[in-house]
Structures are given as structure tokens and as C-alpha cells.
Amino acid sequence: MAERQATVQVKEAKRQAIESRDSHFSALEWFVNRDLSVFLKQCPAYALFPETEYGAVEMTNWYREQLIKVWAGLDPAGIRLMILLGLRKARDWHDRALRLGDKIISAEATPEAVRLDPTFAMDAISWSEIVKKLKKQLEEPQIDGEDGGVFHPDPIDFESFGLPEAKLVPDWQRAEIQCKFETDFQNAIYCLMLESWRAKTCPNCRKYFVAAKSAQAHCSHECYVERKNKASLDYWKKKGKAKRVARTKRKKG
């Protein structure tokens, strides 16, 4: 009896794990493919920041761009993935970085992330622009609506802006280090990273999707059929028609 109960518990735990994984994957598909307002309405638990937080929209859109690049295989040094997981912060480099064409020129040293991955330079600049805008809004003197007095906001640590940092928890008994995340969004990113082969781009509609099987190349059966029909038509125009004409001539001759 006890053995049967243990088996049932294992099956239930496995079922819940699969449901959680599928929920994570679905939320990420909504995030990278849909408008932000649609994503938040469909997957509110996966919101990166509270709606009331300053700069929530700008920061969320920036993180979406980073995830799309990771999804498309454009993160050679893993900088963007580390930032998404909270293993590295997207720092504000605006004060010591100058824009010159498509490069970062620094009076001191080039930021480490840009040294590791030069393609991250423009993303570093765009994050700095977001922080610069927030600094201007939040550090300006505010007028008290009740007595009309002016007060100065408390200093803000702008280096802490962005997704919360992940916690690394060592487990001596299991001989492993576990990552603990504060948001469902980061848990979803981690879940997809463990099965990164699933992250694909549909060659027909260019939608980012999570594949159910390794051989799946299209986001849906409709896209598969449309792509196949297009390939068949292209072949007919280039070679098929000419082959039929040649075959007909041989039969008549």
C-alpha cells in the first residue's frame, strides 16, 4: 500500500512539474511575440516589474530585446542570459561612456560585458539611456500637493535597477549549487535554458516558439503546410515546369 502511494505521489509531482514547465514556456512565447499590454493581461504572474514601478515599461521592453537575442542565438558570451537570470546586473555606464558611431568609447576602461561581447555595446548604451531618464525624473525636486512645499527625494541606488539578483545556494549533501529566483519570469528563463534546444524561430512566420520535439521546425501545422506549398511552387517555377516540358517532348519524339 505504501509503495503504491509513493508511486502515485511521484506521478503527481511529475505531472505538476510538466504543467509548470509548459506554463513557463507559454508565458515566454507571449512575452517575445506579443504586445506588452497583451502579455501582461494574459500572463500577469510573469510581469517583470509592478506596473507602478518607475520605468517598468522601458525596462521590460529592454529585457525583451535581450531575450529575443538570446533566443536567436545572438548572445555569444552569455552576457544577456546572465542579466536575464539576475546573475549579472545591467549597469549604468552613461557617465563614463561616450557614443561614437556604433561603439562605446570610455575615458576609463571599456565595460567588462562589452569586452566579452562587443555586440552588447549598443544594448549597454540603451540601458544607460533608460537609467539616465529615470534619474532625471526621480531626482528632480518634488512639490508636495498638500502644502505646496518643495522636497528633495532620498538618494536612489540606480545600480540596483532591473530584475532582482539570483541567489546561489550551495548544497553539501547533493554536491551541487542551486539557483533561487525571485520572479516567475526568471524561473521561466532558467527552465528554457535547461532545454535550450526547444527555443526556435519559425522559418515561415518568424515567430519565436518553444518546440515540442527536436525535429519540429515550424510553430504550427499551418505554417508547415504553407512553407511546404511555397517550396513546391518555387521548385515548379524553377525546374518542375521545364522537366515536364522535356518529358512531354521525349514522349512525342
Image: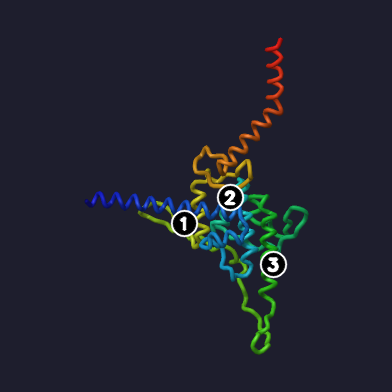
Q: For the point 22% across and 51% down, which residue is it?
A: 1
Q: Nearer the viewer, residue 78 or 138?
A: 138
Question: What residue is at 77 percent from the left and 54 percent from the top?
Answer: 101
Q: How far, Cα to Cα, is label 2 from label 3? A: 25 Å
Question: Which residue reaches farthest bottom?
Answer: 147
Measured as percent of width and height from the top left, residue 73 is found at 60, 45
Task: Point out the tag, 1 or 2, that comes first from the N-terminus.
Answer: 2
Give the amino acid at mark 2: Gly
Quick check: 218 above or below 171? above
Separation of residues labelled 1 and 2 (CA atoms): 16 Å
Q: Residue at 67% of width from left, 69% of height from top?
A: 134
Q: In front here: 30 or 142?
A: 30
Q: Is residue 18 above or below residue 154?
A: above
Horizontal side of 132 relative to 50 (left or right) equals right
Secondary structure found at label 2 = loop
CA distance separating discs 3 and 1: 31 Å
Q: Quadrant of residue 204?
A: top right
* Circle 1: element type: strand
Amino acid carrying label 1: it is Cys
The residue type indicated by label 3 comes to Lys
**Earlier-in-chain disc, 3 versus 1:** 3
Q: Determine which residue is flagged by label 1.
A: 179
Q: How many other residues sit within 10 Å of disc 2, few (<14), some (14-19) or many (≥20)? A: some
Q: According to the image, label 3 marks what residue?
A: 132
Quadrant location, the C terminus: top right
Q: Residue at x 60, y 66 (%)?
A: 161
> Residue 106: x and y, percent?
72, 58
Mark 1 burial class by Cα count in 10 Å: few <14, some 14-19, many 20+: some
Of 19 and 108, nearer the camera is 19
Disc 2 designates what residue?
78
- Which residue sits furthest left? 1
